[in-house]
């Protein structure tokens, strides 16, 4: 039996079934476009290794490690709050950002541990020091003291700062957001629960 489609563009595009001529040529052009696009995609995926920037996701500078991090001077929370960068921070913004923490943490002294430890009185104390909470070995061995700079590095990317931590939180990438959140936490983590 002789096919009436033989020799037409429809055959070159492996198009079957009845179609208008306009549809057939559109399909043909699409398949040509795909043919050329594939090697381009493959090339893009094969950038030379040397061209990879030394950054973590989001273009941020390479994350610091808790083990070698300089936490700076250890002072009472109130003293940190008086430092210009926290005194001028947007506390309301900080409170909004803290809502993400409340899924796992209570913030005021004496409250219960949840999925994460209670954060009451956390500033200027060593990491992983709350009784009655099962910390990861990674945080327990981090050698950190929770100064604002340590908090800042932690909140930027917990899993990079303390690899192996059990805190599953991606981090806040904007420095101004972390400053606002820390300013809010400096106040609230010192307050007794109402
Ligand atoms: C999904 C749950 C979860 C969320 C959300 C979360 N955390 Fe945590 N957090 C944890 C867990 C679990 C730990 C204990 C980590 C470990 O042992 O490695 C922890 C530990 C901490 C510690 C160390 C406490 C200590 O005693 O050393 C701080 C500080 C902290 N979180 C702050 C925050 C802040 C601030 C936020 C909000 C931006 C937040 N976390 C969001 C679960 C969470």
Image: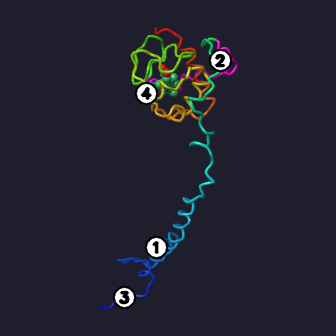
- According to the picture, the residue beneath numbered tag 1 turns out to be 27
Was residue 85 drawn as part of the magenta stretch in this picture? yes
Q: Is residue 5 above or below residue 41?
A: below
| Quadrant of image for the N terminus | bottom left
Inter-mark Cα distance, 1 to 2: 68 Å
Q: Secondary structure at mark 1?
A: helix
Q: Say few, some or many: other residues with alpha carbon within 10 Å of mark 3 (under 14 / 14 to 19 / 20 or more).
A: few
Inter-mark Cα distance, 4 to 1: 57 Å
Instruction: Give the residue furthest to the bottom.
Output: 2
- Between 172 and 65, the residue placed more toward the observer is 65
Inter-mark Cα distance, 2 to 3: 86 Å
Whether tag 4 and tag 1 are in contact, CB under 8 A, the answer is no
Of the numbered discs 2 and 3, the one sitting upstream in the chain is 3
Whether tag 2 and tag 3 are in contact, CB under 8 A, the answer is no
Q: Position of residue 164 (x, y in %)?
A: 46, 33
Whether tag 2 and tag 4 are in contact, CB under 8 A, the answer is no
- According to the picture, the residue beneath numbered tag 2 turns out to be 73
- According to the picture, the residue beneath numbered tag 4 turns out to be 136
- According to the picture, the residue beneath numbered tag 3 turns out to be 4
């Amino acid at each position: 039996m002789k096919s009436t489609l033989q020799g037409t563009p429809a055959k070159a595009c492996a198009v079957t079934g009845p179609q208008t001529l306009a549809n057939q040529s559109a399909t043909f052009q699409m398949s040509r476009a795909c043919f050329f696009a594939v090697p381009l995609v493959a090339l893009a995926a094969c950038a030379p290794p040397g061209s990879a920037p030394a950054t973590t996701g989001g273009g941020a500078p390479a994350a610091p490690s808790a083990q070698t991090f300089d936490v700076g001077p250890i002072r009472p929370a109130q003293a940190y709050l008086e430092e210009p960068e926290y005194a001028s921070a947007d506390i309301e913004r900080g409170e909004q950002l803290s809502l993400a923490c409340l899924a796992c943490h209570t913030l005021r002294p004496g409250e219960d541990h949840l999925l994460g430890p209670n954060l009451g009185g956390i500033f200027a104390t060593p990491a992983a020091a709350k009784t009655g909470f099962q910390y990861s070995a990674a945080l327990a061995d981090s050698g950190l003291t929770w100064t604002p700079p340590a908090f800042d590095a932690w909140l930027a990317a917990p899993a990079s700062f303390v690899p192996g931590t059990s805190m599953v939180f991606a981090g806040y990438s904007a420095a101004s957001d972390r400053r606002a959140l820390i300013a809010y936490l400096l106040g609230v983590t010192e307050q007794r629960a109402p």
